[in-house]
Amino acid sequence: MTTATSRLIILGLGFLGGIAAWPAAELVLYFQGSFPSYLAFLALLGAVVGALMGAFFGAAEGITSRIKMRIPPGLLLGALVGCIGGAAGALVGQAALWLIGGIFLLSYRDMQWVVLPVSRAIGWAVLGVFVGAGEGVRALSPKKIAVGVLGGFLGGIVGGFALEYSRLLLPGFAFFRLVGLVILGLAIGFFYGLIEQGMSLGILRILAGELKGKEFLLTEKRVRIGRSPRNEIALPAYEDLADLQADIRVRKGEPVITNLQPRLPMLINEEKVQEKKLKLGDVIKIGSARIFYKFG
Amino acid sequence: MIRHCKTVAIFALLALTAAAASALNVSVAQIDSSGLLLQQRVNAYVSVTDDQGEPVTNLPQQAFSISESPDGEHYTKLPVLGFEPRAGANEGITFLLMIDNSGSMYDAPDATPTTDPARMKVTHAKAAIRAFLASMTNPKDRVGLVVFNTRYRLLARPTADRERIASLLDQITKPVPDEAYTELYASLKQGSQEFAGISGRKAIIVLSDGENFPYFTHSGKPHPEYGRRIFSHTESITANQEEGVTVYGIDFGVGEVMDKNLRTIAQETGGKTFEAARGEDLSGVYAAIHRQVAGEYLVGYRATTTPAEKKYVQVTANDQGKESTSTRFYFSSVVFGLPLPRLSPVLVIPFILGFALLWLLTLLKLERRPGPASLEVLQTRVGHPMTRMLPLSGSKTVIGGSRSADLTIAGAPQLKQEHATILFDPKDKSYTVVGSGEITVNNQPVKTRKLEPGDVIDVGGATIVFDDSKDKKKQKK
């Protein structure tokens, strides 16, 4: 699938995450009166929403890379990281409320319309940071974590505002939280995709064979290519290439491809090379796979 | 000696009887919920008065009990966690003095017109306020000043600088006829907003000699600021309740009717109305209000987490068997809104639906299946392709700028009409590209070249991918 399709899928997962998180949030809210404190209530609410959103986003990589074995661990780790993020977000949101409310001591209306939504949106941004970073944690990739942190933060703050203001702008509408949570999920997905694209050095597109048309963003510091599903670019259905055939490392901001298996040749633009700095438009041939390096 | 003891005993008995006979009036004057979301703390300012309306300020903490309810019916008794008698006197009070500066304030208190400034109601009002300011001794007390008629005019936000407030009184002058209406409700609403940034005990003392007399209703012309909007007394009640401000009303003078809703506004915000028929009575009224507010108890508790738009606080004071209860509500900040009225099993549906669609997504095959021989235009540096995907069917496929080409790249001037041709060789079922202009395959310049699946042909800046996966598979089989 193309990177545009991948982004659509991530957006769709955010949407589904919002839908699945809604009944859980309603359940927690229904029992709000049984909580010993507001903070405990908010922490559980954040943890539940974060776990569900994290689970859906955690499944994204497995779905877009079509490597199913990545789905269960991604889902579980995403849920765990999201759960921690949601609870942490509640604490940060409350601290923000305490700071803003304590320093400015505003009127009831300012409190309702500015301080409360702003501080809570900060809390949702923290949730977004963790939800976004989940995949990076699974892949142990600092670059992906950075993408997730930034994308999740932006999505969380935008979605968080939507979620908090949906209460004030849609009074009497029974499904306002559903709308807000769906927007939160969509926003995290949207900004994650946007940042991932923005931080990438280009796209590697598979030109023929089983994965024809599949595109990989060159975001990480090291991208491995080979038959093994552990690789970032996993090509299990292609012939004449090793489990780990080549890798692309970013050196001084530019991608350099290296053939790691000299007995199996790598051709770039029909020329056999061992190591080469990639230029946009290059055609890489390893085994039966053809890869086109294009602008992201 | 014995006679003396008897006398003391009789006096003591009389005093007790009198105390038992006198009632206890409890009123929750203000609820400060500013600490609700931060420390989950709510403070109630409770006024306890005797029959004469004088504050009773010596009750111990044990005399008070406090309950909270989300609906005004079901109360939960909560422990009293904070207690301070004479809280207003100790912690300071913030007053906003609002003075009616309509035309009638320049008449005498008996409603007769006068040209003698000393007899005018406004002069008495200024004198009473000066006395009130002078009587305040707590440096923590703050006073703000507002005059209102057709317009609302803030002379000073609440400040500890009482001398400045006194000097500002001189700025109050007789209004021109168009300015002489009484926007009482609008002004009380606006007044509630002057307490932003102030915590603790907050009160408005509004002095008026007549009723709400809106400009638009009575002049027929749109108000310079409010336009055609007419403010209701309920708006001023809600605004003051939200900000936790108590309104005390002073009805000054005779002959004119007090606004019919001022008493309701005062009661609903925890205050009272007072009457001052003569100028000399005014100082006493201001002093009584101050005494009452200063003598209030602060009773604090930890709020319940039950979500509700309004929460009702019930305070009961018990002094030697005499008991009195008062209830007041506050607007509780609802984090994340109110819950659904009941949990429905239908809620499971979106939860299951979300995961079911996630599972479906994992099954989706989004890649294009390897198909028959085709050309796909990936990108163009110049011009735009008329088709993105072209299955190769005939024995000859032309790529070029011409509209009659099989794959037309329009708007690329360097492209020949028939720039490249793909020829099919039925013998070995292979395809060969032949360039009449400059072409590259996999970035290598070529004139002619047999194509393999995944080969990238550059035709005048258009990147075209050749694929023939299906046939290749067939061949393998």
Image (cartoon, rainbow, N blue to C red):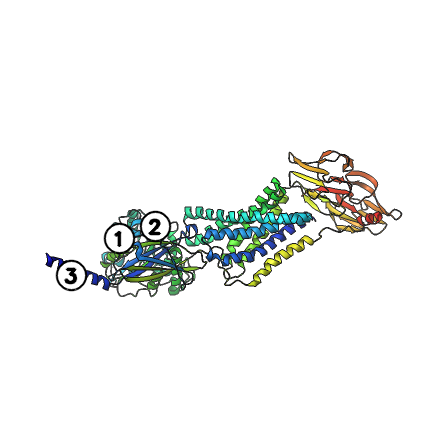
Q: Amino acid at mark 2?
A: Ala
Label 2's element? strand
Could you tell me if the residues under marks 1 and 3 are in contact, i.e. CB atoms within 8 Å? no
- Dot placed on the residue nearer the N-terminal end, 3 or 2: 3
Crowdedness of circle 2 by 10 Å Cα count: few (<14), some, many (20+)?
some
Tag 3 subunit: B
Could you tell me if the residues under marks 3 and 2 are in contact, i.e. CB atoms within 8 Å? no
* A144 displayed left or right of B447: left
* B96 displayed left or right of A40: left
> Do marks 3 and 2 share a chain?
yes
- Indicate which label's residue lies in the foreground, 3 or 2: 3
User: Which residue position holds label 2?
Assistant: B156
User: Which residue position holds label 3?
Assistant: B10
* Cα separation between marks 3 and 2: 55 Å
Q: Position of residue A124 (x, y in %)?
A: 53, 49
Tag 2 subunit: B
Tag 1 subunit: B
* Rendered residue at 41%/47% (across/down): A102
Q: Which numbered circle lies on residue B132?
A: 1
Label 3's element? helix
* Cα separation between marks 1 and 2: 16 Å
Q: Amino acid at mark 3?
A: Ile
Residue B265 occupies which quadrant of the picture? Answer: bottom left
Crowdedness of circle 1 by 10 Å Cα count: few (<14), some, many (20+)?
some
Residue B58 vs residue B330, the one in the foreground: B58
Q: Is residue B99 visible?
A: no
